Amino acid sequence: MKDRIVHIVGNGDHSTIYLAKPRYGMKLTCNLPPFNVPDRYASMIVDFKMMKAMHEGSVVVPGELVLGWRPKMYLQKFTNFHMKMSPQIKEFYTVLPDYVANYTDFNCGHMAVHYAANKAKATQIHMYGFDSIFDFNLRSCTDFYLGSDRGGNNNIRLAGNWRPVWQNMFNEFPDTKFFLYHSHNALKFPVGSNVEIITDQKMPKG
C-alpha cells in the first residue's frame, strides 16, 4: 500500500523545522500558521476565541478551513457570518475521542492530528511545533494575535490535560506512524513503536 503522508505545522517554537527541507504530502496548519505553508489542504480551528477574532476582522486566516465543534456552534449563532465565510469552509470535524473529557481539552493540534489519522487515513503523520509534548513550553504563535493565559498554574493544567490526549491518540492509531520533530528526544510520556522522534533536522537561522 502506498503511504499517505500528512504534515502538520503546529504553533510552537520548533514549527520552523518544517522549513528545513521540502515536504511532500497533505499539509495541515493550526489556526493562523507562523509562516506561509504553500499548497496547504486546510487550517484547523477549534475555539470560540479564534472565531470571534475572525468575525471582528482582527484576524484573517486565508485558505480553506476545517472547523471543530465550537466553531460550528459559533456559526449557528451568527448565521450572517456563516454565510460570509462559507466559501472557506471545507468541512466540520466534530469527533471527540472517548479519552478526551471535553472539547476544551481537545486543542487545535489534537484535532489536526486526529483528523489526519481518522479522516484522511494517513499512514505517516509528521508533526512540527508541538513543543508542549516535549517541554514545559506552551508558547504559541497564536499568542501574538490572541491573548492567552500562560501563567504557571494554567500551564500545569493545560500540560496535564493535553499530554494524556496525545498518549491515547498515538495508541488509538497503532498502524499510523507518527514522526515528531524537535531539538531533543526527551518525550514526557511513554509511547509505542509507532512514534519516532526526529532530532537531526534543525530550525533555520535568522
Image (cartoon, rainbow, N blue to C red):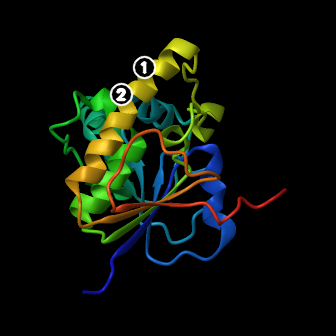
Please name whichever residue, 14 or 9, is drawn nearer the observer in this view of the structure: 14
Locate residue 69: give its quadrant. top left
**Label disc, if present, on residue 157 of the rendered structure:** 1
Residue at the farthest bottom position: 1
Please name whichever residue, 125 or 31, is drawn nearer the observer in this view of the structure: 125
- Residue drawn 37% across the image and 45% down it: 190
Q: For the N terminus, which image quadrant?
A: bottom left
Look at label 2 and name its amino acid.
Asn
Where's residue 146, x and y in %? Answer: 57, 29
- Residue drawn 65% across the image and 66% down it: 200
**Label disc, if present, on residue 47 of the rendered structure:** none
Locate residue 19: give its quadrant. bottom right
Res 113 visible: yes
Decide if residue 105 is on the left or right side of residue 173: right
Where's residue 156, x and y in %? Answer: 48, 20
Q: Secondary structure at mark 1?
A: helix
Q: CA distance from mark 1 to mark 2?
A: 6 Å
Where's residue 172, x and y in %? Answer: 21, 52
Please name whichever residue, 90 or 102, is drawn nearer the observer in this view of the structure: 102
The reply to whether the C-beta atoms of the residues labelled 1 and 2 are less than 8 Å apart is yes
Q: State the residue position of label 2.
A: 161
In this view, 184 is above or below 50? below
Decide if residue 157 is on the left or right side of residue 90: right
Res 47 visible: no
Please name whichever residue, 38 or 18, is drawn nearer the observer in this view of the structure: 18
| Neighbour tally class for label 1: few under 14, some 14-19, many 20 plus, Cα within 10 Å | few
Decide if residue 111 is on the left or right side of residue 15: left
Look at label 1 and name its amino acid.
Arg
